[in-house]
């Protein structure tokens, strides 16, 4: 019964009630202004229903936040009441309730982000497996099953388009939450802070994702949408009501991204421990800071582009409909100005994780630490000047192609700095092949494939032939898995003892790695080959005479290997959380400050501030240490 008193449950009840209330409010306003509630014309009637439902959904998202208690302290402040900064949990409630309720501890919020991220990745994976079954052979068979028609009201090609579109955007939302998980959990601990700069804003940034994710997933039951994850007009102007759920859901996730980035920027710049200059700050924090700057400055553009599509659908404004004077290419400029920097929002934290783990498991200093730190900002800056390489075939002015081609190729320079650093760090190191290290090394190999398949898409002559083929799909999956998925799994395994005080199952972790690595290489490389052979992306069927059936079947098998690897990961983590071997002390022999504290991390990370006295990655050097955990000479028992 305690679950029914959590913020999560109360928020869902408030969202359901708020949605009904919001729909009633819209209908009341229509009556007041003399507007009809229905129409004999089918298209007009569908538009009226859409206006009513969208109004209800937006009000429902707001009431979720109120019901969950996210605004409670702010409401008290607005009324002139005192609010406390003591966020010590209630000892009368079981600890698990903290993870289903509004909590201001960055570690709890980090876990909330992480679990929600993994759930969204699971849903995105299920959508992929459903349409991969369809693509495993020519002819439309599986998605024409009657069960889909009964459950959803549609099947066949439109269902494929919906599953393919949802797979893309749900995975992207899951990755964004995974970025939030790593930044929230790790940044304060790595810089010596006890929490984020703005704990209440931190809680808001997480909880707005919950109604956002629910609304996004609900698009499956509102007729779906057939635009792909990009939402291009004019398709997005003509899609069913599910399109609005997509737009609203992603808008709320984007709002979370902006709010979370403010916290990371302020925390990193103002709350570092004594002696921690910028160049003595861990590389992951550099990556998180560069990521937050991207989120803070670019996310508004995707929010704006989606908002304009919503307004055009609801109010008849003409931003993108070329038949009414709009310009659909304008949408692409707005969308990609964020969505290509967003690729680096996904991968920069992952590359930061790789740079954190390689020195630990090779027992060597990170080669070129300062250059690696600055390379994250180099990638972030250049990423703002590359968006139009997605638009070489869009009808954009041809003279713009050349500068965008060169700027895209320029991204390889700061990215190459990281690769050379990793290679030099591993060279002649005493490498320990634990599960986190395996996933970090796998990430390097896969991301390298993403890097070498990028220039053909950045170069005009080759992109004109490869655009919208499966070569793009293979490149993008290489980038996402190498830049985020594998590093994210590595980070969870590496910091799992710190989160839980327990060790994961090493044998299961290594089985998962090989299952995922082999399956992914099979899947991704076949995607690249199919693209070179002319297989178009976002199509439900292909001619058997093309001879693609065997490759598509093998590709599907590889996809299922990755999927089952992630299921094994979930089992390993869930079981180890309560039954794993107790993790005592510095399990990785790390120099990082959080590993100098007990497992799991204390409620207040560092009751006594530490001082940075050396370099963070001087592994293997005699008489070298990074932090002095007892600078004031307190009794060690106090730490």
Image: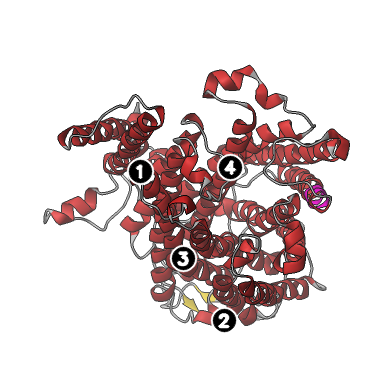
Q: Is residue 223 left or right of residue 462?
A: left
**Residue bearing mark 2:** 614
Looking at the image, which is closer to me, 221 or 439?
A: 221
Part of the protein shown in magenta: 525-530
> What is the chief secondary structure element of the magenta stretch?
helix
Q: Position of residue 170 (x, y in %)?
A: 54, 44
| Quadrant that contains the C terminus | bottom left
Comparing marks 2 and 1, which lies closer to the viewer?
1
Label 4 to label 3, Cα distance in Å?
Answer: 22 Å
Mark nearer the N terminus (2 vs 1): 1
Q: Is residue 111 above or below residue 245?
A: below
Label 3 to label 1, Cα distance in Å?
Answer: 25 Å
Q: Is residue 373 left or right of residue 17?
A: right
Mark nearer the N terminus (3 vs 2): 3
Q: Position of residue 131 (x, y in %)?
A: 67, 34
Q: Quadrant of residue 124?
A: top right
Looking at the image, which is closer to me, 639 or 132?
A: 132
**Residue bearing mark 4:** 165
Answer few, some or many: residues within 10 Å of disc 2's Cα (few below 14, many 20 plus, some between 14 and 19): some
Residue 529 forms part of the magenta stretch: yes
Q: Secondary structure at mark 2?
A: loop
Residue at image position (26%, 43%) is 66
């Amino acid at each position: 019964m305690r679950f029914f008193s959590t913020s999560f449950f109360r928020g869902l009840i408030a969202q359901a009630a708020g949605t009904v209330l919001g729909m009633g409010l819209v209908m009341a306003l229509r009556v007041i202004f003399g507007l009809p509630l229905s129409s004999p014309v089918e298209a007009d009637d569908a538009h009226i229903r859409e206006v009513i439902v969208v109004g209800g959904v937006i009000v429902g998202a707001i009431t979720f936040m109120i019901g969950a208690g996210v605004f409670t302290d702010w409401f008290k402040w607005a009324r002139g009441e005192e609010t406390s900064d003591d966020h010590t949990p209630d000892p009368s409630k079981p600890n698990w309730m903290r993870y289903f309720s509004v909590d201001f501890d960055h570690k709890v919020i980090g876990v909330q982000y992480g679990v929600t991220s993994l759930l969204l990745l699971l849903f995105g994976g299920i959508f992929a497996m459903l349409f991969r079954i369809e693509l495993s052979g020519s002819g439309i068979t599986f998605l024409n099953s009657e069960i889909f028609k009964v459950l959803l009201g549609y099947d066949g090609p439109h269902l494929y388009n919906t599953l393919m579109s949802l797979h893309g955007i749900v995975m992207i939302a899951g990755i964004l939450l995974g970025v939030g998980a790593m930044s929230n959990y790790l940044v304060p601990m790595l810089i010596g802070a006890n929490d984020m700069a703005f704990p209440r804003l931190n809680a808001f940034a997480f909880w707005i994702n919950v109604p956002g994710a629910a609304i996004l997933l609900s698009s499956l039951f509102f007729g779906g949408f057939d635009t792909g994850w990009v939402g291009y007009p004019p398709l997005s102007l003509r899609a069913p009501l599910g399109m609005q759920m997509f737009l609203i859901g992603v808008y709320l996730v984007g709002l979370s991204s902006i709010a979370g980035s403010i916290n990371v920027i302020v925390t990193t710049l103002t709350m570092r421990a004594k002696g921690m200059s910028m160049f003595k700050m861990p590389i992951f924090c550099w990556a998180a800071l560069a990521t937050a700057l991207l989120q803070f400055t670019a996310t508004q553009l995707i929010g704006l582009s989606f908002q304009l599509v919503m307004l055009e659908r609801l109010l008849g404004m003409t931003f993108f409909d070329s038949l009414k004077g709009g310009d659909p290419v304008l949408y692409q400029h707005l969308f990609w100005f964020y969505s290509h920097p967003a690729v680096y929002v996904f991968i920069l934290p992952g590359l930061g994780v790789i740079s954190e783990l390689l020195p630990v498991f090779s027992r060597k200093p990170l080669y070129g630490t300062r250059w690696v730190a600055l390379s994250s900002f180099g990638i972030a800056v250049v990423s703002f000047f590359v968006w139009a390489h997605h638009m070489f075939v869009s009808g954009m002015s041809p003279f713009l192609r050349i500068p965008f081609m060169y700027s895209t190729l320029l991204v390889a320079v700061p990215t190459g700095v990281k690769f050379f650093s990793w290679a030099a760090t591993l060279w002649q190191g005493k490498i320990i092949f634990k599960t986190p290290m395996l996933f970090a090394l796998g990430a390097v190999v896969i991301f390298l494939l993403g890097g070498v398949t990028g220039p053909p898409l950045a170069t005009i002559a080759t992109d004109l032939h490869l655009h919208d083929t499966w070569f793009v799909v293979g490149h993008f999956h290489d980038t996402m898995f190498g830049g985020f998925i594998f590093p994210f799994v590595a980070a969870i395994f590496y910091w799992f003892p710190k989160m839980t005080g327990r060790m994961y199952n090493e044998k299961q972790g290594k089985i998962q790695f090989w299952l995922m690595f082999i399956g992914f290489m099979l899947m991704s490389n076949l995607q690249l080959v199919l693209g070179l052979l002319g297989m178009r992306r976002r199509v439900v069927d292909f001619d058997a005479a093309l001879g693609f059936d065997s490759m598509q079947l093998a590709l599907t098998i590889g996809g299922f290997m990755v999927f089952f690897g992630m299921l094994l990961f979930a089992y390993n983590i869930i079981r180890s959380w309560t039954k794993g071997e107790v993790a005592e002390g510095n399990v990785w022999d790390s120099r990082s400050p959080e590993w100098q504290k007990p497992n799991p991390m204390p409620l207040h990370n560092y009751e006594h501030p530490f001082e940075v006295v050396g370099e963070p990655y001087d592994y293997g050097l005699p008489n070298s240490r990074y932090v002095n955990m007892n600078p004031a000479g307190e009794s060690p028992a106090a730490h």
